[in-house]
Image (spheres, coloured by chain):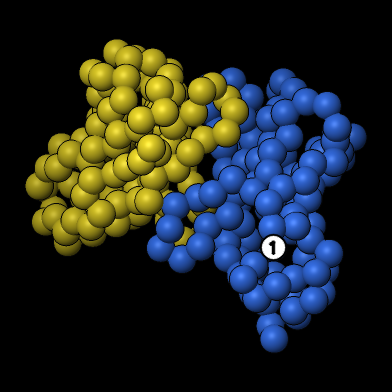
Chain colours: A blue, B yellow
Amino acid sequence: AQSVTQLGSHVSVSEGALVLLRCNYSSSVPPYLFWYVQYPNQGLQLLLKYTTGATLVKGINGFEAEFKKSETSFHLTKPSAHMSDAAEYFCAVSDHNDMRFGAGTRLTVKP
Amino acid sequence: NAGVTQTPKFRVLKTGQSMTLLCAQDMNHEYMYWYRQDPGMGLRLIHYSVGEGTTAKGEVPDGYNVSRLKKQNFLLGLESAAPSQTSVYFCASSYSKDTQYFGPGTRLTVL
């Protein structure tokens, strides 16, 4: 079965600094990979996804992620953090019929 | 389009009581899912369905039952609630193993 590991349950950055949220996965078949964001008391919203093709994918709100098969990684980055980016971020992997989520990383943005 | 809706939004139960959570989607998706979200554990899949009349177990199915009598609805039942089932429950739907669309969640407390 597929699985996801997110390194760091909490990440804190200053406004304007680089955001890097780490995700490693395991899957027995070529995976679909996702990053979702969750704001307080809301459901999850898709930030970006990788299915096939270009390994660098761009999402909403200036986020991007790169699929690295050799490293089994799908790290999420944003060049310059904004206060509105404060939320919880989940990496997910899907191979057959279901999707498995990481434990989440809570991003704090300091003024 | 309403997307994915969940009822109720909040519920408090006593140990041993039963209840049903309703999920509805208007996107004509074949796949539907029920997750629970607990602090530090991300989202864990309870049950899922790949089409009307079909259901399958996820990671944490014990204590829950589901039914998918209509394509647009996916019901999650708790026959005898336990305090360990206190959680936030999310429903999601998708076309296949691609992007899942989430409802706003149901916060359940079992006393």
- Residue at the spot of label 1: A8
Residue lying at 26% horizontally and 19% vertically, measured from the top left: B70
Q: Amino acid at mark 1?
A: Gly
Quadrant assignment, res B9: bottom left
Return the x and y of residue B48 as percentages of the image width and height.
Answer: 40, 27
Residue drawn at 68 percent across, 30 percent down:
A32
- Give the percent coordinates (x, y) of residue A13: 74, 76
Q: Residue at x 37, y 51 (%)?
A: B104
Depicted A23 relative to depicted B97: above or below:
below
Tell me: B42 left or right of B58: right
Q: Residues within 10 Å of mark 1 (few under 14, many from 20)?
A: some
Residue B31 against residue B104 in the figure, above or below: above
Residue situated furthest front in the rendering: B1
Q: Quadrant of residue A56?
A: top right
Foreground pick, A26 / A34: A34
Q: Secondary structure at mark 1?
A: loop
Q: Quadrant of the N terminus of chain B?
A: top left
- Return the chain for callout 1: A
Which picture quadrant has residue A108? Answer: bottom right
Residue lying at 23% horizontally and 57% vertically, measured from the top left: B10
Image quarter where the C terminus of chain B lies is bottom left
Specify whether B100 is left or right of B83: right
Q: Nearer the viewer, residue B77 or B103?
A: B103
Tell me how many marks there are: 1
Horizontal placement of B37 versus B84: left or right? right
Image location (x, y in percent) of residue B79: 15, 37
Can the viewer see residue A4 in this picture?
no
Q: Is residue B65 visible?
A: yes
Task: Report the side of B111 relative to B40 (left or right).
Answer: left
Rendering coords of residue B92 (x, y %): 43, 37
